[in-house]
Image: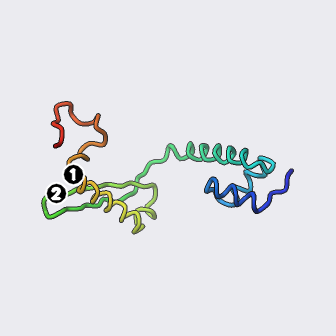
Amino acid sequence: MAAITTEAIKELREKTGAGVMDCRRALQQSDGDVQKAIQVLHAQGLERAGNKAGRVARQGVVETFVHLGRVGAIVELNCETDFVARDEGFRALAREVAQHIVGVGRATEFVAPEDAPADMPEEE
């Protein structure tokens, strides 16, 4: 087995953003080859994503934004845990999304253009 250097771990971490120990394990599995280690980390990421696929986001926040008392938006932003839902950063994200929706206006009535009714007039 090839010796795993801190430089190799640092290089892999910079390329992938993975944790130090994950990088070290991937380099050990790939005998120090950085390209193979990237593939190992990618496979592990896909496996972890597959494990999370069945989870349901049951927690979250509802935020509103009203501009000049005339235009408003209500946003529900869900997450997996109440710990995240109570985080001020998460709540700020929900507020910013509501503000963005109000700022964009009518264009956000539908998630995608194909969701809009066929007889809906084009915006000017």
Residue 68, quarter of the rendered image: bottom left
x 30%, y 59%: residue: 62
Q: Which mark identifies residue 105?
A: 1
- Position of residue 88 measured from the top left corner of the image (x, y, whole percent): 39, 69
- Position of residue 34 measured from the top left corner of the image (x, y, whole percent): 73, 49
x 73%, y 58%: residue: 9
- Pick out the residue farthest to the bottom: 88
Closer to us: 58 or 122: 122
The reply, left or right, for residue 71 in relation to residue 51 is: left
Disc number lying in front (1 or 2): 1
Q: Residues within 10 Å of mark 2 (few under 14, many from 20)?
A: few
Residue 82, quarter of the rendered image: bottom left
x 59%, y 43%: residue: 46
Numbered disc 1: secondary structure: helix
Q: Which quadrant of the rendered structure holds the C terminus?
A: top left
- Position of residue 60 measured from the top left corner of the image (x, y, whole percent): 38, 58
Q: Name the residue that disc number 2 marks.
A: 71
State how far apart marks 1 and 2 are (Cα): 8 Å
Closer to us: 72 or 80: 72
Numbered disc 2: secondary structure: strand
Q: Residues within 10 Å of mark 1 (few under 14, many from 20)?
A: few
Closer to us: 46 or 33: 33
- Pick out the residue farthest to the right: 1
- Position of residue 41 measured from the top left corner of the image (x, y, whole percent): 66, 48
Circles 1 and 2, Cβ within 8 Å, touching? The answer is yes
The reply, left or right, for residue 117 in relation to residue 53 is: left
The reply, left or right, for residue 6 in relation to residue 76 is: right
Q: Which mark identifies residue 36?
A: none
